[in-house]
Amino acid sequence: MGASAGAAHSAPAPSATSGPPRPLSGTELCVSAVGYWAHEMLDGGEPYGDYQSMGLSNRQYDILRQVVEAARATKRTQGVRAAEELIGRQTREACTERYRDGGPSRGPWRS
């Protein structure tokens, strides 16, 4: 049995009813982007340029800074696992709150 036979079993077969993937919501995009950078920064990484070059809005960057500050404090007192759990929880909560009404209402720079 070759490598291709094993790979065939790992991916689900496409169905006739499946269509293109649905676009992510504002909340999901926020959680993904902020969560990514929060984990990078917790591990000692520095931000890549300014918030816009990181692909974040000003508000998302505010969320990122708050989450990373809390995660670093948690990492010092409770360890990496607790800090990573905090990142997931606080990022989800903050992004959900921010996008509960569907997103910015006064232009793309307000997201």
Image: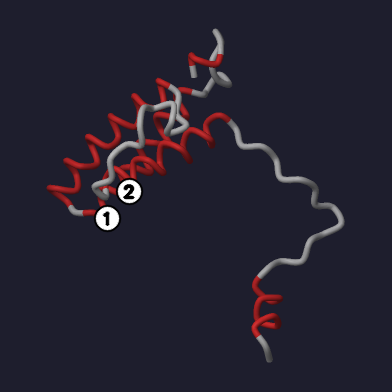
Please tell me how crowded label 2 is: few (under 14), some (14-19), or many (20+) other residues with Cα within 10 Å: few
**The residue positioned farthest toward the right in the image shown:** 16
**The residue positioned farthest toward the front in the image shown:** 49
Secondary structure under badge 1? helix
Residue annotated with mark 2: 85
Q: Position of residue 28 (x, y in %)?
A: 53, 36
Q: Position of residue 18 (x, y in %)?
A: 80, 52
Please tell me how crowded label 1 is: few (under 14), some (14-19), or many (20+) other residues with Cα within 10 Å: few
Q: Position of residue 16 (x, y in %)?
A: 87, 57
Q: Is residue 17 above or below residue 25?
A: below
Residue annotated with mark 1: 81
Apparent side of residue 70 relative to residue 15 in the rendered image (left or right): left
Secondary structure under badge 2? helix
Apparent side of residue 27 relative to residue 53 in the rendered image (left or right): right
**The residue positioned farthest toward the left in the image shown:** 77
| Figure quadrant of residue 7 | bottom right
Is disc 2 in contact with disc 1, using a CB cutoff of under 8 Å? yes
Report the front residue among 91 and 52. 52
